[in-house]
Amino acid sequence: MAEHNSIAPIRLGVNVDHVATLRQARGTTYPDVVAAARAAVAAGADSITVHLREDRRHIQDADVEALTAIGELVVNLEMALTDEMIEIALSRQPRDACLVPERREELTTEGGLDVAGQLEAVTAALQRLHAAGINAALFIDPEAEQIDAAARAGAHHIELHTGAYADASDDADRETQRARIASAAEHAAAQGLEVHAGHGLTVDNVGPIAAIPAIVELNIGHALIADAVFVGLSEAVRAMRAAMDAGRRALD
Ligand code: PXP
């Protein structure tokens, strides 16, 4: 039996971008992103993630302002590596920020940030965010080269991209991708990096990722908001928490 004490509990960050997607589809004032964030936390989320994209396709600057104005709310701001976004982070002071790659034509964040290929720029951005007291992270693919670069750049933590796992075509591929994430997480933790993960996770596929001991936080959005259409956001968050906790318990 594994030593339970040695396994960190797993946290859930709820990404509310697609509450804003629904609002922006009609240019209405509803559904309310702040109300969604409050409901998610009341149902068991540990933090709220928003991605302020350069094209403002879902989350707007006013959403970031409203969320970061709520003192007790832990906000994780996902952002591109641009001066504009860094200035916004510095002025709004979310507790966490995560640098992600961004391409205007993509539907979602398709891959991890190439930290190794732009080490100087990433290091400088992390320094500016850290100097303001923001825990700055990097969203990267589960590859040793990127993890090593993230450690060198001075990231507070990393978030491993789980998209290839979520999109696996069959069980064998899914297991290959899970093992890749598990060994990347161990490699990062051995270098003192806190490890988060996310992208494409659902109530059905989250268990094996929650069962990776080195991962301490998952960020989940699209599938949660999709489930909320049928069961409501609170129940969707509770079901995701239960699936994560069941996966974690498999370590006992
Ligand atoms: N983590 C990061 C860095 C992301 O960019 C996204 C998508 O915005 C997520 C997690 C959540 O992914 P999903 O919406 O597929 O759950």
Image (cartoon, helix red, strand yellow):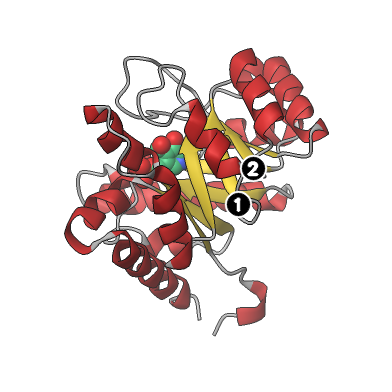
Q: Camera-side residue: 111 or 42?
A: 42
Give the answer, above or below, for where 232 lies relative to 153: below
Is disc 1 surrounded by few (<14), some (14 to 19) or many (20+) residues within 10 Å? some
Tell me which corner region of the image, top left, top right, bottom left or bottom right, holds residue 119: top right
- Check disc 2 and report its element: helix, strand or loop: strand
Q: Where in the figure is residue 90, as x and y percent of width and height? A: 71, 28
- Residue, x 42% and y 31% (percent of image)? 59
| Furthest residue in direction front, as rendered | 29
- Residue, x 50% and y 49% (percent of image)? 48
Give the answer, above or below, for where 175 lies relative to 244: above
- Residue, x 42% and y 29% (percent of image)? 111
CA–CA distance between discs 1 and 2? 8 Å
- Residue, x 54% and y 43% (percent of image)? 67
Image mark for residue 174: none
Image mark for residue 96: 2
Mark 2 is on which residue type? Asp
